Structure formats: C-alpha cells, structure tokens
Image (spheres, rainbow, N blue to C red):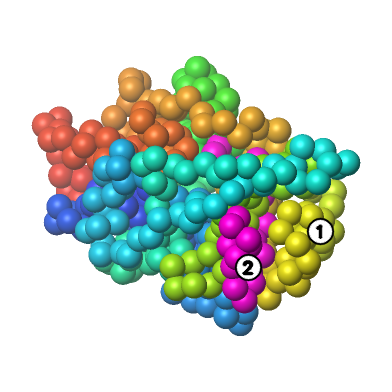
Amino acid sequence: MQNVRIAIVGAGLAGLYAAYSLEKKGIKDYVVLEAREILGGRIASTAHSAGKSDKSGVEGFDLGPAWFWPAFQTDMGRLVDELELETFQQFETGDMLLERSANQAPQRTRGYVNSPPSMRIAGGMYSLIDALYGRIDSARVVTGQAVRHLRMSESHIELVSVNASGETFSHFAEHVLLAMPPRLVESQLTFSPALPNELERQWRETDTWMTPHAKYIAVFDRPFWRDHGLSGEARSAVGPMVEIHDASTADGKAAVFGFLGVPADVRSRVSDKELMTACREQFVRLFGSQAATPEAEFIKDWAREAYTATVADQRASGDHPVPALSPSSGVWGQRVTGIGSEWSREFTGYLAGAIDAANRGLTSVLKPRSDTASFNNQT
C-alpha cells in the first residue's frame, strides 16, 4: 500500500517522461505502475529491454516506432538533446522500388526524401527509454502490476492492481495520469463511480496507434542494396509487406524492415515462421538473392500485445486517431488525465504526441488547488 500525490499508469514514453518532468520540478511524490515486466510500452528494440540484452547479440533495431521530426516536433527534439542522445538521419539516398502486381517485375523509380528529414536515435529508440529511466528514481517504478480498478473517495483515488500471480495491491493518489491508449483504459480498467457514458464511448472508439501493424526486420552483414543505387525503400501491392525502408543503424549494422499489409485477424492464423518465409521471399524479389539469407530476422505483431491492443483493434484503420478527451467535469474531472499519445492535440499517435500530451496533462495537474488539503494529512 502506497500513498502518493500522483500515480502514473503506464511506463512507456509518456509515463516515463511524466516522471522525469516531475523529478525536474522537485516532485518525488509519485509512483509509476506498469503491467509489463519491461518498460517502454510501444517502444521496443531487438535484444534490448530496460538495459538487458538477450543472447542474439543483435541490438538497436526498432520493432516499434523508429522516427521523429525535430524540425517541427520541437518538444521531442529538445528532450532528445537534453538527454544527450545521438541522432542520425534516416537513409533515403537512391531509387525506390514499386511492386504493382505478382505478374510484373518490381519497377525502379526516383526515391522520396522527407523534408524536413526523419531522424532516428543511435542504438534504437529504446535508448530514449533507457535515458529517461536512468534519470528518475527507479524505486518509484513498479513493473508487473496491471491496474484494474480506480475507486474515488473524497480525499484520494485508490488504484487496485494485480500481478501475474493474482495478488492484488492498492496505491492511493490525489491524481492519476493515464499513460495508456484510451481504448485499452476503457477495456481493462473499471471506474467507481462510472465514467460518463459519452466519454467511455469516445475512448472505446479511439483507435490505438500501432495496433494494426506488424513489422518484419532482416539483418545483413552489409547494406548490399545501396551498391545498386537503391535506398532500401519500396512499396508493394503484392505483399506481404506493403511499405519497406532501410533500417540500418548509425554504427553500420545493415537491415531492412517492412510493415505487413496482412490484416491482424488474418495474421493470427499464420505462424511467425510462415510470415518470415514470405517476407524473405519478397525481399529476394525486390533486392535479389543476397536477401535470402539474413544474419538475423525478427517479427513484431503489435496486435498480439495484450497491454497494447484490444479485440477492437484487430480491424483498426491504422490512421492517426482523433485526440481523446480527459474527464472535464463530474467526480473524475481534474482528477484523472490522459497523457498517452492518443490524447495529444498536435501529434496524435506519434512519439512526439506522448511528449505533447504529458506536458499538457502536467500543466493541468500541477496548478495550485486551494480546495485540497495536504493529501498525506488526510490518509
């Protein structure tokens, strides 16, 4: 049992950034509750989780989001600079390939270059998670506890969580920051008293970014496609991947990745082995026989992540959602605030959206409340 001023539900980018921002303001009266055993939420990199590596030795390839645009996502850019993380520009030099049909060879065309450029973080996007975690009090981050109930009283909110063994825990807070997708909150958390029906409906109908997607990554000894003047980028109407990019790292590890265009409910009926075989065959069609034998390969299906996706996400559009709303009135008004990327007004679904939503949420939470006595004196 723990009494805190602020409870943060979720230890992805939004949750850890919120904790980091509180620490910078000298506020240490908080707790972060994460259902997974690892941090990061929708940020995941190969062989890398909370400072741990698996035995593959292949690190730094992003299984979740990979890019940001500091030229216009300025808060995100400032954070990366503040954490002294090295960045590099996404490789886009050369021609791209188009697969229009199964009966037609891939066509070369002039490649597309982002302007302003899309940037990546050296070591993978998980380096951002590691850097934030390293700058907060790790004792205030609790993993392996899924919050299931929020119960309101006059002086506090009780957060009831459960671990993998079925044990329950209670934390008490003045304010709750929801660093989770709204649809997941509506699906997995109960509120006592209940939320307004219209708000529940809005959260239920807000698509969770990333959930329809699956990524395949193939790692090679060198970026051989560049020898032929190719950028590694491709678009395909044949599949199974519909959008493909160079995924090579800043230190020269070569890779290509693609987003699968197969719907999530169809993917669920096919093994990873079958999907990877089909993806390798597509890379051979596009880039030649050297693509047939990657040094390593990975597939990440976000629709299978119980702490990211719900059944409703199986057929989500994949588009960036309309921003979700936090409770603005009633018993939950000013007591619960959404800070996940789907609550962002400017960059909904993007990494920068988590920063934007967290900044807005913290501004609201940290306003002086003359009507509230000292929490610790009341509990």
**Which residue is located at x 46 percent, y 64 percent?**
124
Image spot of residue 177 (x, y percent): 35, 42
On residue 155, the disc is none
Mark 1 or 2, closer to the camera: 2
Going from N to C along the chain, the mark reached first, 1 or 2, is 2
Image spot of residue 219 (x, y percent): 63, 69
Image spot of residue 283 (x, y percent): 74, 57
**Which residue is located at x 43 percent, y 34 percent?**
348
Q: Which residue is mark 1?
A: 281
Is residue 174 visible to us here? no
Instruction: Say above or below: 348 vs 161.
Output: above
Q: Does the magenta portion include 337?
A: no
Name the residue nearer the viewer: 172 or 54.
54
Image quadrant holding the N terminus, namely bottom left
Tell me where the magenta segment starts and ends, as one range.
208-230
Is residue 290 visible to us here? yes
Relative placement, left or right, of 364 versus 65 is left
Name the residue nearer the viewer: 147 or 133.
133
**Which residue is located at x 57 percent, y 42 percent?**
110
Asked where in the image residue 56 lies, by quadrant, the reply is bottom right
Name the residue nearer the viewer: 126 or 181.
126
Relative placement, left or right, of 183 versus 143 is right
Q: Amino acid at mark 2?
A: Phe
Q: Which residue is mark 2?
A: 224
SS for dot 1:
helix
Q: Residue furthest top?
A: 198
